[in-house]
Image: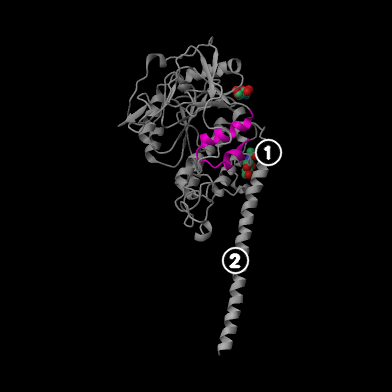
Amino acid sequence: MAASYRKARVKNMAFCRWILIGVFGVVFLVLLLRTNTFIDLISRYSLETDETLGSNHNYTLSSEKNLKLPKQNEFSISLEKRNQMPPRNLDLYPTLAKNHIIIVLYVHNRPQYLRLAVDSLSRVVGISETLLIVSHDGYFEEMNKIVENIRFCQVKQIFAPFSPHLFVNSFPGVSRNDCKDKDDTAKKKCDGTPDQYGNHRSPKIVSLKHHWWWMMNTVWDGLKETSGHLGHILFIEEDHFIYPNAYRNLQLLIELKPKKCPHCYAANLAPSDVKSRGEGWESLIAERMGNVGYTFNRTVWQKIHRKAREFCTFDDYNWDITMWATVYPSFGGPVYTLRGPRTSAVHFGKCGLHQGQGERSACIDNGVLNFEVEDVDKVPNIKSGWGVYVYKDQAGYQAGFRGWGGWGDIRDRQLCLKFAKMYEASEAGIV
Ligand SMILES: *[C@@H]1O[C@H](CO)[C@@H](O)[C@H](O)[C@H]1NC(C)=O
Ligand SMILES: *[C@@H]1O[C@H](CO)[C@@H](O)[C@H](O)[C@H]1NC(C)=O
């Protein structure tokens, strides 16, 4: 009896071994396939050029075309359909001015802030000449109400359909088997690739970079309303206060840029140092790209779009630091932006959270801002006769910085690369 028991046990063990080998085989295969599609995506990407402009867009999303975007829930699909709706207020503003600068306001969920940003926009001289696109990360009724009530120009709302905020139990949201914090992937048998510091993805944190990249790709390459727009687009956020002279100043800067600063890629409403309100000099300023009120044209977008691999694989969850540390340095020269000597936009935060940053930082307390707009900021205050002062070798993030992490998960990197291909794949004749 003992012998037959041992025999059975040996048999059992052999069986177990086979099962184990089988399981390992499958896991290995899955891993291989995953890395392969990832590498495939990257190499396909780097072969790409995107000189194709405007003409033959087909705006159906290309999930059919092997992009394998995450499986959408009904709500995500309904928001995506909503993105196709025409702008509001076409009855009030049936046409856009020639050479208008489209404004893109990208928001998450701070209604108190958004109310102020929108209120400031309503006082911007010239705003009725253009289209305002509001890009939402997640769906929030209060945010939505504020945007629906805008009457001062054409308004188009778009919602990021793959926002982690729309997925409660699957990627890009949290899925059940996801690793957390500093989990050991092998030990816990959970899903995820840790970042360079050993931390796993946090959907709330990665959502910002995803939204920015989705929004950039969509407003340049995925909307009927912008497909013929070769000119500039201005980008602002829900915590930016825009001065009444912002639009007219920007028009001046854009007009002056080719002559005064041919090597400038962009024009900015605000200094790159967000605490500064400008020097007040009688001069234009060229400096490194800032992240408040930056404005560039389609040529520059195409240059950025070609660096999707750099953008999507850099281990930093901040879109702006990613741009400074990898994308701009890859252009092969300093990336300057042109601005006036007085700011036309400020970034504001909650009062009391800025200790040590000086009394001049803009802040909001109970829905009220701690500063007022001076008269000189209500009219254009840039002179075409001015020269340009160039800030050379400014401090800040540079090529070589390895990133703050938070962007290590292969799934996030893949999704990001897919956003870059989303509309291209659906263009007639291009796969
Ligand atoms: C756009 O793509 C869809 C689906 O691939 C196709 O049925 C339709 O004919 C295309 N339209 C144009 C204008 O190419
Ligand atoms: C867009 O801006 C860049 C940088 O300022 C400039 O070189 C380019 O000629 C502009 N493109 C168009 C179409 O105006």
The answer to if 421 sits in the magenta stretch is: no
Residue in the foreground of this view, choosing between 199 and 400: 400
Farthest left residue in view: 366
Residue 87 percent across, percent down from the top left: 48, 32
Residue in the foreground of this view, choosing between 269 and 154: 269
Mark number for residue 48?
Answer: 1
Q: In which quarter of the image is the C terminus?
A: top right
Q: Which three-letter amino acid code belongs to the residue tagged 1?
A: Glu
Q: Residue at (37%, 16%) from the top-left corner?
A: 374
Residue 328 percent across, percent down from the top left: 59, 31
| Left or right, 398 with reference to 117 | right
Tag 2 secondary structure: helix
Q: Which three-letter amino acid code belongs to the residue tagged 2?
A: Val
| Left or right, 159 with reference to 6 | left
Residue 221 percent across, percent down from the top left: 59, 35
Q: Name the residue under label 2.
A: 23
The answer to if 311 sits in the magenta stretch is: yes
Tag 1 secondary structure: loop
Residue labelled 2 has its Cβ within 8 Å of some atom of ligand 1: no
Q: Quadrant of the N terminus?
A: bottom right
Residue in the foreground of this view, choosing between 393 and 162: 393
- Dominant SS in magenta: helix
Residue in the foreground of this view, choosing between 94 and 369: 369
Q: How far apart are marks 2 and 1 (CA)?
A: 38 Å
User: Is residue 34 depicted above or below 25 in this figure?
Assistant: above
- Using the rendered image of the protein, determine whether residue 228 is visible from the camera's viewpoint: no
Point out the stretch of residues depicted in magenta.
306-332
State which image quarter holds ligand 2.
Answer: top right
Q: How crowded is mark 2: few (under 14 residues within 10 Å), some or many (20 or more)?
A: few
